[in-house]
Image (spheres, helix red, strand yellow):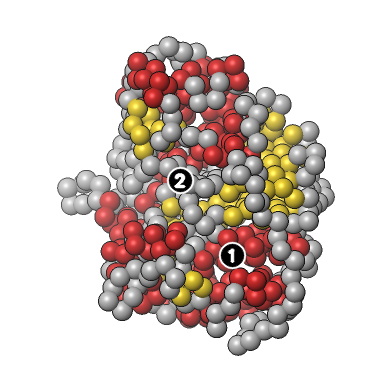
Amino acid sequence: MMTSFLSRRSLIASLLASTALPSVAFAQAAAPQPIISDWPRRQPVFATGGMVASQEALATRIGAEVLEQGGNAVDAAVAVAFALAVTLPRAGNIGGGGFMIVHRADHGQTKAIDFRETAPASMKKDVYLNEKGEADLNRSQNTGLGVGIPGTVAGMALALEKYGSGKYTLARLLSPAIQLAADGFLVGDDLAFSLKQAETRLRRFEASARIFLTADGAALPRGANLQQVDLARSLSAIAADGPKAFYEGPIAEKMVASVNAAGGNWTLADLKNYRAVERDVVKGAYRGHEIVSMPPPSSGGVHLIQILNILEGFDLKAAGQNSADSIHLFAEASKLAYADRSEYLGDPDFVQVPVRGLTSKKYAETLRAQIDPAKARPGPTIKPGKPQPFESDQTTHFSVIDKDGNAVACTYTLNFSYGVGMVADGTGILMNNELDDFAAKPGVPNAYGLVGGDANAPGAGKRPLSSMSPTIVFKDGKPFLVTGSPGGSRIITTVLQVLMNVIDHGMNVAEATEAVRVHHQWLPDELRVERGLSADTIRLLRARGHKVEIRQAMGSTQSILLTKQGFEGASDLRQAGTLTAGVR
């Protein structure tokens, strides 16, 4: 059954209004259109009744429909997450994990939900080393040894139970995703491109090829109908029986069998024992704003705040947005933070992470003093600092806020595009290769060039370090900016630049999103810049000693800014198919 866009929206509205699980056909009730901007690209979408920004249009509209029908931001976020598992299969998922920041306006509480994947109980520290003791990244990137125990289903269920409005059951919020998986939807440009890029990876697994490739082994083209019947059945089981249907029983058995057939070493107990965890957020202050972000096992929040602390001592507004001066300072501060990341960050349930020291203003002063405003410092000469005395790439992000000021920033992932490339046979569920985020061997870069140490070594039950940075910025005690991005090691600097563009340079959220981005992660020692940066600026940066490399587009931010008039939103145009939708 294929439907037009308008009838699809009516069907979504009908599903969300019903407590029944989907069947063959549904009544189609009239539904109001979300507010979608027709203004020039540098202008944000505007609304007063709530807003959803995500990387995929159907998922955004589903979230907006939840808000339209009286759900809160968490209700909408859960519906978006499950919809993206169907419509954005390269990153949206139930076979991966991630992080969510939730703000409840009624009592001013902001919490972090950690649904990061965990290593199975069998994992050893040397699991990714060959017989010579050298790191073998093929094991973590392309086999079952790289697949972590998924957390998304547990995380969404926890968020809904604790912070949802109570108006929606998990089954109701799953209904649109189930229908999209069962009926299929037309492959657009973005999905067709990503499938073509992952064609070889997907072809390795028969279950994946059956879903995402044509009979002759080519990626589904634009205009094809992507139908995921097994995934619809899995989602229906979760709708009927909750997370238990995912972590125990037939779905769990099929995931264990597929992962182990690909070289992994899972047990049913690994799945049954998985728990999503609530954590205290990490907080900082920057030029009169409170920055709230994800704590370890994400490095995102810690280093977001650390870099802002360093930069607060410089007049970036006077330096100018994307000037050679401001980019130089940004790069030098980023190098220092990423060096610390390599030494100190890991799973806080297994290692002591000096969060207070790393985010200390006093510690930032010692780092700021190491920056020469006129000259780049070579990366290899920078070593991790000593924060202890100050103690006291293919991912997706979506942002949601409702009319009452409840807000969600959520980033989740399979790691690589389409994860390890494997669909667990009989489930329709794409599996992650998230355990590649462990440091296979101290000093050896992972797929994103990030260097790690013993704090992020593989281990039984551990959660690998991440850069995901779902963030809510507060002003005068109320949400001001909700944002986040995919992008692997570039997530932290991407989110940072959106914050700086808004706070330091007074840009609207669309301008802040569109602006050219830069990135430095200490090692490799190169300053990556997107196309569009002034040739004169590049020349000046090189004159200061930066090795400037022009790279592909970075990140795909989904941001909502609160103003006195209402909500302004912007979805990144660096990737096709993104959408921000507002509610009247």
Q: Image quadrant for the C terminus?
A: bottom right
Distance, label 2 to label 1, CA atoms, is 22 Å
Give the quadrant of residue 261: bottom left
> Can you say whether 26 is above or below 37 in the image?
below
**Between residues 224 and 348, which one lies in front from this camera angle?**
224
The x and y percentages for residue 567 are 73, 46
Q: Residue at x 43, y 33 (%)?
A: 532
**C-beta proximity under 8 Å, tags 2 and 1:** no
Q: Residue at x 69, y 74 (%)?
A: 10
> Can you say whether 478 is above or below 209 in the image?
above
Badge 2 crowding class, 10 Å Cα cut-off, few under 14, some 14 to 19, many 20 or more, is many
**Could you tell whether 451 is left or right of 371 in the image?**
left
> Can you say whether 133 is above or below 238 in the image?
above
**Between residues 509 and 101, which one lies in front from this camera angle?**
509
Q: Amino acid at mark 2?
A: Gly
**Could you tell whether 181 is left or right of 144 in the image?**
right
**Could you tell whether 298 is left or right of 51 in the image?**
left
List the residue tagged with mark 2: 487
List the residue tagged with mark 1: 58
Q: Residue at x 46, y 75 (%)?
A: 225
Mark 1 falls on what kind of element?
helix
The x and y percentages for residue 458 are 38, 50
**Between residues 538 and 253, which one lies in front from this camera angle?**
538
Badge 1 crowding class, 10 Å Cα cut-off, few under 14, some 14 to 19, many 20 or more, is many
